[in-house]
Image (cartoon, helix red, strand yellow):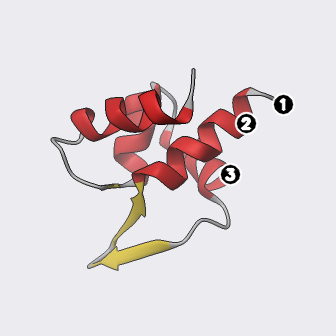
Amino acid sequence: MDKQSLTKDMKAFVGGGAFITPTQTAKYMRLSPGRMPELLQDLEYYKTGKAKQYFIPDVAGRIVESSQM
């Protein structure tokens, strides 16, 4: 799994956008939403109302990093 293909797949999952919420990330990864704060910790986000929107390439990079540990 590489960052580029993961980014492309995640963008398709959210309908072509550049940002993803923690809830969408959990659904994409088939994980509990409770595990997302740990994964998304220290990433920059854009807040829209109550939702935090994370830049998909940043999230993809973090997923790749965590899978290589």
- Give how far across and how far down residue 60 sits, in percent: 52, 42
Outermost residue toward the front in this view = 4
Outermost residue toward the top in this view = 1
Q: Are marks 1 and 3 in contact (CB under 8 Å)?
A: no
Residue type at the position of mark 2: Ser
Residue 12 horizontal side relative to residue 68, left or right? left
Query: In the rendered image, which quarter is residue 55 located in?
Result: bottom left
Residue type at the position of mark 3: Glu
Q: In this view, does 57 lie above or below 55?
A: above
Helix, strand or loop for disc 3: helix
Q: Are marks 1 and 2 in contact (CB under 8 Å)?
A: yes
Query: In the rendered image, which quarter is residue 13 located in?
Result: top left
Q: State which tag comes first along the sequence, 3 or 2.
A: 3
Q: What residue is at 66 percent from the left and 61 percent from the top?
A: 41
Q: Mark 2 highlights which residue?
A: 66
Helix, strand or loop for disc 1: loop
Q: What residue is at 56 percent from the left and 48 percent from the top?
A: 36
Residue type at the position of mark 1: Met
Q: In this view, does 57 lie above or below 32?
A: below
Residue 55 horizontal side relative to residue 44, left or right? left
Q: Mark 3 highlights which residue?
A: 38
Query: In the rendered image, which quarter is residue 40 located in?
Result: bottom right
Q: Mark 1 highlights which residue?
A: 69
Residue 4 horizontal side relative to residue 47, left or right? right
